Image (cartoon, helix red, strand yellow):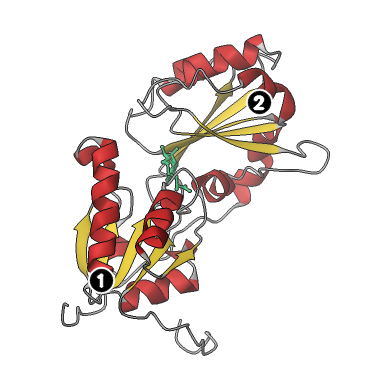
Amino acid sequence: MAGVMPRLAAPPFEPGTVWLVGAGPGDPGLLTLHAAHALAEADVVLHDALVSPDILGMAVRARLEPVGKRAGGQRTLQLRINERLIRLAREGRRVVRLKGGDPLVFGRGGEEALALAAAGVRFRIVPGVSAGVGGTAAAGIPVTHRGLARSVAFVTGHDAGGGFPADLDWQALAQGADVLVLYMGLRTIGAIAARLLAAGRPATEPVAFVTNATTPRQRVAVTTLADAETTAATIAPHAPTVIMVGPVVALRELIGPWQDTAPMVVTPAPRRATA
Ligand code: SAH
């Protein structure tokens, strides 16, 4: 890439601050320039399980601290992450909190920002390409499309306890949004599809499952609302998957075959002194 990039003046990553950074859905090429800069400068990176090793490899001088949600009770863990961020900042580190996709889309980045604000720690939020937009695009499916879909709802398929979020207004979602993009919905899609059908969405409405989007392991399964649960059962239960319900899914047939999706390849730079 040398020679083609203009010179960029990144804002300084001050010691004692935290950057809440979106890593995008997987392809390192979907990082923002702010994210790449933050990774290069960071002393410590607290990262989720979903972030790819290629992207972590860009943090050449940082200590990596995995803080995956699967490691324990979610509530306690979030508190501990908040405390850890505050503590590292107070020690004068440049701290990156790296999350898959966008940090403020089903990523609890807002809670971390609130905790940092309450503790008087300066921070910066670096948005990322959310799986519901970048992952669906990688499958060749536009989230909106003139004449087909003028509204889109991003919806969680899980409640805080990991079950079907029965308290969401599924009737309103079914009737109010042309396209539904479901995060964390693989295990609850049966119940979700039943609610959407009951609210009047057609049984033949196309549904796409996009798994490991923008990575070399990306898989796309297209089905219908009536068959969504059966299709979900063919996908590994923990594989990150966005589910898209709506007429736009039909465009994949026309767009997908012509689309190049090779991810950017990272050649790790030699590691520099750790903090
Ligand atoms: N902050 C993230 C979402 C975190 S919730 C974002 O903005 O994308 C975790 C869910 O995101 C997963 O259950 C899955 O639904 C979705 N997801 C994240 N990365 C994905 C990927 N590479 N492919 C498909 N879905 C993904």
Q: Secondary structure at mark 1?
A: helix
- Tell me if I can see residue 163 in this picture: yes
Q: Which residue is mark 1?
A: 90
Amino acid type, label 2 = Leu
Looking at the rendering, the quadrant in which ligand 1 lies is: top left
- Horizontal relation, residue 59 to residue 271: left or right: right
User: Closer to the N terminus: mark 1 or mark 2?
Assistant: 1
The residue positioned 52% from the left and 46% from the top of the image is 135
Q: Position of residue 220 (x, y in %)?
A: 49, 36
- Horizontal relation, residue 117 to residue 16: left or right: right
Alpha carbon separation for disc pair 1 and 2: 43 Å
Q: Is residue 161 above or below residue 62?
A: above
Q: Secondary structure at mark 2?
A: helix
Q: Position of residue 37 (x, y in %)?
A: 40, 77
The residue positioned 47% from the left and 82% from the top of the image is 11
Q: Quadrant of residue 43?
A: bottom left
- Horizontal relation, residue 207 to residue 163: left or right: right
- Tell me if I can see residue 253 in this picture: no
Amino acid type, label 1 = Arg
Q: Nearer the viewer, residue 262 or 201?
A: 201
The residue positioned 66% from the left and 45% from the top of the image is 255
User: Quadrant where the C terminus lies?
Assistant: bottom left
Q: Nearer the viewer, residue 261 or 96?
A: 96
Numbered badge on residue 173: 2
Crowdedness of circle 1 by 10 Å Cα count: few (<14), some, many (20+)? some
Residue sitting farthest toward the right? 147
Q: Nearer the viewer, residue 16 or 52?
A: 16
Q: Quadrant of residue 44?
A: bottom left
The residue positioned 32% from the left and 55% from the top of the image is 52
> Can you tell me whether the CB of the residue at mark 1 lies under 8 Å from the nearest atom of ligand 1?
no
